[in-house]
Image: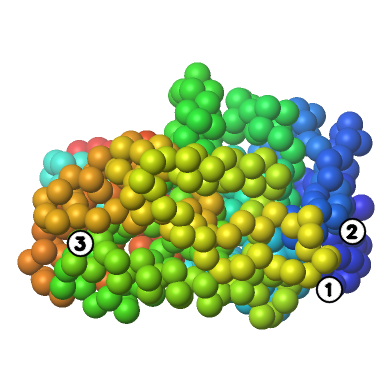
């Protein structure tokens, strides 16, 4: 059954059903080789909305074979032609953005207005951005010897395995597949078990433009599908976003093959609010930075907020009031600001951290917003955002990645102490500082141990801005020209003797 033959409805529930139990390999929608599936659950209601194909080794092998067969001809296209096709994929996805956004909200519990619709639109934007960078796939001439013409050229790696997470599946997938494809590689995506449907729909639409086999997608669990993809001899590069623990496993598996990996892992991102900061702007920055509309399920979430003691109490009061005003409810309701946690397992994890904080002497848990009262959502995985005060920077809640709507607000008196606490972490993904003093801002950007540092703002990752972490937050960069050149091409040196 080819993707062109599948007639899809635009309502998210119908679309979920029509995509049930399918992989996309070699331009063809097909079930897993074993015929096995697993349930896809709406986290707002607990209802099973679809099934996903439970891919395994035979499916991985089929996808790699299809990718290898397609990659040579794809690489022989001019870079600008590959870029043009990516731009056309982006154009088509604009027309499907609403249906994809609603499907994403249904399967992940992310609110349609504040999260899912925005993410769906970013996919097209990312494809268009990288499509325009195709002409930058060029080398350099090297003045090695006057009688030798010496130059470098960029060549694709071959087949790329892209393993994506559930929290921002579409955008993070786009940041992987777009540079890999423009650089001339074929790609196999392995979706997250919790969010396989919207990603499949994006790949299906792109396959209406791209040659069969250039872009494939599998679903399944890590051991059964992800590990065979990483270890398959036909895969020459792996790019992964997810937990530190899984990233280490992937790194070890890739090391046995001596293939490159890009790892975007966890974070415990600090936000420093100096005594001279614009308090209202800092409050807005904390709401955006904690990704409360995403239930805090973000590796860049500002889950440690260091506030000068002169502003601390006012900051907590204003932040609580701001989050209290946000509406938690049905992710498909336009009035909803905050949706759900992704899965029962993650729900229990977040609740356990909240319970740990509440049991700590001296700690105060400021619960925000209000749980929905709609009976249809009684089984939904809703968690009230919690602001903890009274916790030290060495507490588990301030050191471990919770991946939920929980942040620690910690008072400080001295700037040097704030910097020391901010850097006292195994992670180094993102950081922000809020101040009116230019010297303080510039000093902090130099000394904060994070790969993505902002002053007086808390933007999400943007196409064109190099993104990647220090320490255990990962290896390599994404979202930039640098990412395409360094991580999805080989650099070859050529010397021609002119004598």
Residue at horizontal 61%, vertical 68%? 370
Camera sees residue 370: yes
Q: Is residue 137 left or right of residue 344?
A: left
Quadrant assignment, res 77: bottom right
For the image, the number of numbered tags is 3
* Residue placed under numbered mark 3 in the picture: 309
Is there a contact, CB below 8 Å, between mark 1 and mark 2?
A: no
Judge by depth and name the residue closer to the eye, 44 or 266: 44
User: Which SS class for mark 3?
Assistant: loop
Residue 10: image tag? 1
Q: Residue furthest left?
A: 439
Q: CA distance from mark 1 to mark 3?
A: 52 Å
> Badge 1 local density, few (<14 within 10 Å), some, or many (20+)?
some
Say which residue appears at 51% left-offset and 61% top-offset: 367
Q: Residue 220 in the image: state x and y as whole percent.
A: 74, 38
Label 3 near label 2: C-beta < 8 Å? no
Q: How many neighbours does mark 2 have within 10 angstroms: few (below 14), some (14-19), or many (20 or more)?
A: some
Which is nearer the eye, 399 or 466?
399
Q: Give the class, few, some or many, for how many residues have Cα within 10 Å of label 3's Cα (few <14, many ≥20).
A: some
Residue 94 appears in which quarter of the rendering? bottom right
Q: Element type at marker 1?
A: loop
**Above or below for 406 versus 85:** above
């Amino acid at each position: 059954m080819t993707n062109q033959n599948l007639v899809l409805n635009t309502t998210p529930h119908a679309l979920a059903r029509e995509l049930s139990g399918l992989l996309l390999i070699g331009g063809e929608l097909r079930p897993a080789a074993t015929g096995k599936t697993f349930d896809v659950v709406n986290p707002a209601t607990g209802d099973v909305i679809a099934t996903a194909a439970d891919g395994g080794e035979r499916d991985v092998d089929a996808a790699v074979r299809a990718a290898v067969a397609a990659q040579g001809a794809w690489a022989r296209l001019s870079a600008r032609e590959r870029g043009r096709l990516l731009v056309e994929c982006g154009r088509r996805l604009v027309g499907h953005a609403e249906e994809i956004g609603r499907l994403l909200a249904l399967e992940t519990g992310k609110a349609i207005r504040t999260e899912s619709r925005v993410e769906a639109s970013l996919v097209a934007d990312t494809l268009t951005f990288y499509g325009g960078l195709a002409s930058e796939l060029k080398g350099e001439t090297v003045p090695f010897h006057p009688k030798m013409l010496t130059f470098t050229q960029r060549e694709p790696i071959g087949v790329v395995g892209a393993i994506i997470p559930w929290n921002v599946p579409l955008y993070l997938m786009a940041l992987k597949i777009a540079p890999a494809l423009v650089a001339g590689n074929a790609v196999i995506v392995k979706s997250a078990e919790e969010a396989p449907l919207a990603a499949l729909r994006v790949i299906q639409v792109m396959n209406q433009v791209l040659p069969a086999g250039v872009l494939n997608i599998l679903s399944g669990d890590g051991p059964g599908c992800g590990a065979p993809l990483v270890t398959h001899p036909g895969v020459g590069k792996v790019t992964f976003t997810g937990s530190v623990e899984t990233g280490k496993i992937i790194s070890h598996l890739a090391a046995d093959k001596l293939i490159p990996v890009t790892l975007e892992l966890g974070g415990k991102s600090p936000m420093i609010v100096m005594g001279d900061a614009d308090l209202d702007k800092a409050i807005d920055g904390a709401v955006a930075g904690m990704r409360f509309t995403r239930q805090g399920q973000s590796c860049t979430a500002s889950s440690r907020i260091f506030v000068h003691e002169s502003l601390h109490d006012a900051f907590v009061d204003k932040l609580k009031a701001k989050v209290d005003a946000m509406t938690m409810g049905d992710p498909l309701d336009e009035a909803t600001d905050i949706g759900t946690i992704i899965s029962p397992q993650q729900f229990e994890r977040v609740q356990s951290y909240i319970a740990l904080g509440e049991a700590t002497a001296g700690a105060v848990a400021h619960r925000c917003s209000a749980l929905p009262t709609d009976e249809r959502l009684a089984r939904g995985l809703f968690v009230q955002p919690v602001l903890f005060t009274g916790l030290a920077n060495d507490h588990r809640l301030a050191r471990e990645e919770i991946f939920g709507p929980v942040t620690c607000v910690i008072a400080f008196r001295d700037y040097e102490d704030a910097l020391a606490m901010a850097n006292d972490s195994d992670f180094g993904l993102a950081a922000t500082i809020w101040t009116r003093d230019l010297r303080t801002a510039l000093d902090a950007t130099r000394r904060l141990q994070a790969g993505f540092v902002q002053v007086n703002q808390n933007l999400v990752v943007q196409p064109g801005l190099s993104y990647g972490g220090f320490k255990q937050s990962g290896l390599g960069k994404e979202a930039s020209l640098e990412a395409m050149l360094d991580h999805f091409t080989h650099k070859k040196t050529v010397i021609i003797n002119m004598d």
